[in-house]
Image (cartoon, rainbow, N blue to C red):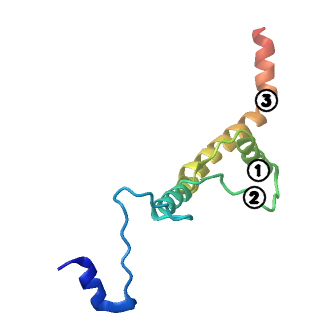
Amino acid sequence: MRIADVASLFGPYVKFVTEEIGGGVEPVAGPNAFHMLMNSARSLQALSLPIRISHVTNQKQKLHNDVIEFFKRRQLQWKQSDVAGVGNSFLKVVVDTLWFLDGHYPCFMQKKSQNS
């Protein structure tokens, strides 16, 4: 039986369209599943900084915010998943070190002048 004979059994309700193999089928515009997966993977690895202290009550908290601003200017950031652990720990070490050194600055300068 030929395809035309089978198609005529269905009448005007079915339309058969043939296309050459390798014919140019245009891709559908808009996001596809691959792009959606890639975007969600990128959002999981979004970069961020530790949270600034909103109500600064002392100079050490001001230093904390200044170090975050320094990181921001230098574009030093962590993956979103690492901010709470590694990012905050690193920030605390840097702030504590600068705080300690700043308090002993006159002593360091005095020793420097003695060695010169």
In the displayed structure, 3 sits above or below 91; it is: below
Q: Which is more toward the observer, 15 or 109?
A: 15
In the rendered image, which quarter is residue 97 located in?
A: top right
**Could you tell me residue 65's position as x and y percent?**
76, 50
Spatial CA distance of label 3 from label 2 is 25 Å
Amino acid on which disc 3 is placed: Tyr
Q: CA distance from mark 1 to mark 2?
A: 6 Å
Image height of 62 relative to 99, above or below: below
Q: Residue at horizontal 54%, vertical 59%?
A: 39
Residue that label 2 marks: 53
Check disc 1 and give the amino acid type.
Asn
Q: In 3D space, how far apart are the residues under numbered discs 1 and 3 (Cα atoms)?
A: 21 Å
Counting residues from the start of the chain, the first of labels 1 and 2 encountered is 2
The residue that appears at 51% across and 63% down in the rendered structure is 36
Secondary element under disc 2, as helix, strand or loop, is: loop
Q: Nearer the viewer, residue 61 or 3?
A: 3
**Quarter holding residue 8:** bottom left
For disc 1, the marked residue is 65
Image coordinates for residue 52, horizontal then vertical, percent:
73, 56
Quadrant where the N terminus sits is: bottom left
Which is more foreground, mark 1 or mark 3? 1
Image position of 15 with respect to 62: above or below: below
The nearer-to-camera label among 3 and 2 is: 2
SS at mark 1 in the image? helix
Find residue 105 and name its label. Answer: 3
Give 101 or 61, whichever is nearer the viewer: 61
Label 3 neighbour load within 10 Å: few <14, some 14-19, many 20+: few
